[in-house]
Amino acid sequence: MQLFKVFFKILNKNKGQLIMYTVIYLSLALLMSSVMKEQAEEEFTGVSLDIALENKDQGKLGAALEQYLGERHKLKEMPKGKEALQDAIYYEEIDYVLVIPEDFSEKFAAGDRENLLEGTVVPKSSSAYLAEHDMESFLKTADMYVSAGFTLEDAVSFTLEDMEEKGKVEFLNQEDGQPLSGGFYFFQFIPYIFVTMMILGVGVVIKTFQNKDLSARNKCSSVPYLQQNLQILLGCLVYMLVVYAVFMVMAGCNTGDYLFTPQGILSAINALLFAVCALCLSWFAVQFAPNTAVLNAMSNVFGLGFSFLGGVFVSLDVMGETARKIARFVPSYWYVIANQDIQKVNGFSDAGTIYKSYLMVAMFSLAFFAAGLLANRMRVKSR
C-alpha cells in the first residue's frame, strides 16, 4: 500500500488550504443560517421617515393630518432658518419637509384641492415619496366624506378611523407553511466547498502522480499497474469520506437533531451523492490542468461557477427562465432542487421527486468520470 500512503503524504502538504476552506465554510454556514433566520420575521414593520413639519393651520384638518403622519412617521421640528434646514437635508437628518399653510382647512372645505400643501422631497431620497403617498391617501379619504355631504369635522373624524385600518401582510418565504430549518441553510452551501476541496485535495494529488518522470518510475515498479490505480482510487475515496464525515459532524453540531429526522437523512444522502460527483469532477478537471497552479484556479472557477449558476448562492426563484434552463446542465442545480424538496416531505415515502434529483446528480458523476477517462486516455496517447 505504498501509493496509498504516498497519497496522504502529498495531501498533507496541502492541509493548510484545506483547513482554511473548512473554516471558511463553517463560518459561512453559521453566518448564513443566522442571517436567514433573522430575516424570516413573523411581523411586518412599515417604513418610518423623518419628516420636518410646520403646521400653521388652526383648523381640524391640519391637526388631523399632523396626527396621522405622527403615527406613521417621526415628526421633527422645522429647523430655524434656511441654512439650518439645508444642513439638516445635507446630513440626511430629515427625509421630507412639509409646511401646512394657515388656510389649509378653509380651502379644503371650500372645495379647493390643488397645491394645498408645501412639501419638499429631499434630493436622491426615493423613500420620501412614501410621505406624499400617505398624505394623498389621507386627503382623498377626507375628500370622499366631504363630497358625500359630511361636515369637515365629521369627515376628519371618520378619516382618522379609516386610516387606522392596516393591511394584513403574509410572508411567502416558507415552503408549504413550514419555516425552513437550520439544516436547509447548512446543506445549501455544501456544493461550493465540496467541489473546491475535492479539486484542491484529490486533484492536486492525482496531478502529482501524473508527473511524467514519476509516472514512468511507477510503471517500472514491481507493483502491478492495476494495483497502483486501485491504491490511488482507494486514497481518493477515503479522502472523500473523511471530508464528508467532517461536515456531517459539523451538521450534527450546528443543526441539533436535524440529522436524525427523515429530512436530515435525505439531506445527508444528498450531500454524499454530491461528494461523489465532486470527486468525479476533480478527476475530470485534472486532465486539463497543466500544473497544480492552474488546478487551484480551476477549483475556484468550478466551485463559484457551479454555485452561482446552480442556485447555491443566488436563489433559483430570482433567476430568469433562460438562466434556469442553463442551470439544469450543472449538478449543483439538482442538488439545490433536492435540498428544497427535502424541506417539504415528512417521510421517505414522500420523496419521489427527491430521488429523481439524486439520479440526476449520479448521472453527472458518471458523465464526469467517463469524460475524465476519455481525456486521460487521449493525454496518455499524445505523449
Image (cartoon, helix red, strand yellow):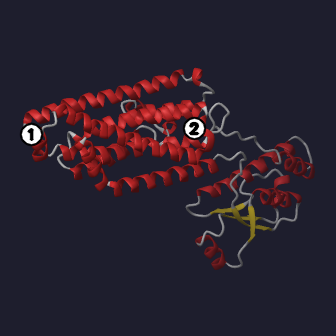
What is the number of the mark on residue 259? Answer: 2
The location of residue 238, given as percent across then percent down, is 36, 40
Amino acid type shown at disc 1: Cys
Q: Secondary structure at mark 2?
A: helix
The structure residue drawn at horizontal position 9% and vertical position 42%, both measured from the top left corner, is 216
Mark nearest the camera among 2 and 1 is 1
- The residue indicated by pointer 1 is 220
The location of residue 172, given as percent across then percent down, is 64, 37
| Residue 87 visible at all | yes
Q: Nearer the viewer, residue 264 or 378?
A: 264
The location of residue 149, given as percent across then percent down, is 90, 42
Q: Secondary structure at mark 1?
A: loop
The structure residue drawn at horizontal position 64% and vertical position 73%, both measured from the top left corner, is 88
Q: Nearer the viewer, residue 140 or 362?
A: 362
Amino acid type shown at disc 2: Leu
Location of the C terminus (image quadrant): top left
